[in-house]
Amino acid sequence: MIGTHRSEPFLKRKVTVMTKSVDPTSKANIVLLEEPDEDEMKARECLSGGLNKFSFGHPTKKNAGTLKVLNDACLPVHYRQWFYDALFTRDIKLSRLVYFNDNLVGAICCRIENLSDLYIMSITVLAPYRKRKIGSYLMHYIINYTKQHTELKRIYLNVHTPNTSAQNFYKNAFNFSEVRRIDGYYTDLTPSDCFELELKIRD
Ligand SMILES: CC(C)(COP(=O)(O)OP(=O)(O)OC[C@H]1O[C@@H](n2cnc3c(N)ncnc32)[C@H](O)[C@@H]1OP(=O)(O)O)[C@@H](O)C(=O)NCCC(=O)NCCS
């Protein structure tokens, strides 16, 4: 989780199509057919509670406001608009959204650093939907992305030291290991320290 704001009521998504997403770079707003490959189908297997109720997508200019509401509801730091605008300057597949019955319930947002590191900026699941493996799906999605991009060597993130449940999630379910503790990482939080955790994908 990187380091800052609160607004907008929860918005129900207007269009639901199981395997479609809108290309935000297109002026024509072309709807792309996104056929899930084998890895994506495997990642979805962990989702319980009726797979047909889930749908998936990437951030678009239309849903960025809802993504911000989700992140603000789940994280102690509130990212400014530039965080969401910057999502469209990168490969859009570095971020993933999960909907349950058309409501945005989970999201992961990542970026590439130093050409070889995939950095998880945020991962959030709405509280009533936790412990249903939505977070696991998001992690499997991003691990698959990293495996498919051979220049990427590791996945890493920063987690607030008191956030033991997230630390357990990364360490127990995904074998992340602690790289170091960084004092004073979060300027707006007390305590301000974080752990850097990583998962090596290849040497
Ligand atoms: C961390 C988070 C994304 C996990 O999402 P989730 O959908 O609840 O996770 P999953 O259901 O996939 O959990 C998978 C495994 O992780 C571990 N885990 C998840 N939440 C845990 C918790 N609160 N305590 C201990 N272990 C936990 C368990 O091993 C769990 O397996 P189990 O369900 O068989 O017990 C979610 O709790 C969240 O949004 N937290 C608030 C935001 C946050 O802290 N994000 C991380 C910032 S660095």
Image: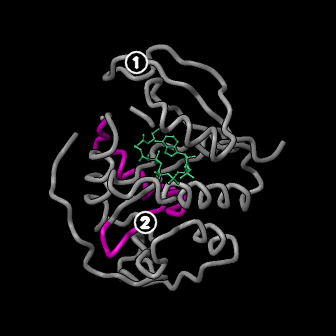
The quadrant of the image that shows the C terminus is top right
Residue 187 appears at what percent x and percent y?
A: 35, 20
Asked if the magenta segment contains residue 8, the reply would be no
Residue 203, placed above or below residue 101: above
Identify the disc placed on residue 98: 2
Asked if the magenta segment contains residue 78, the reply would be yes
What residue is drawn where x is 58% and y is 54%? 139
Q: Residues within 10 Å of mark 2 (few under 14, many from 20)?
A: many
Instruction: Identify the element where label 2 is drawn.
Output: strand
Residue 58 appears at what percent x and percent y?
A: 44, 66
The part of the chain drawn in magenta is 77-103
Identify the disc placed on residue 42: none
Three-letter amino acid code at the position of disc 1 = Ser
Which color scheme is applied?
one colour
Q: Quadrant of residue 88?
A: bottom left
Does residue 114 appear left or right of residue 167 in this picture? right
Residue that extends furthest to the top in the rendered view of this protein = 183
What residue is drawn where x is 66% and y is 36%? 198
Say which residue label 1 marks: 192
Q: Of the two numbered discs 2 and 1 on the same chain, state the one appearing first in sequence.
A: 2
Asked whether 144 or 173 is in front, the reply is 173
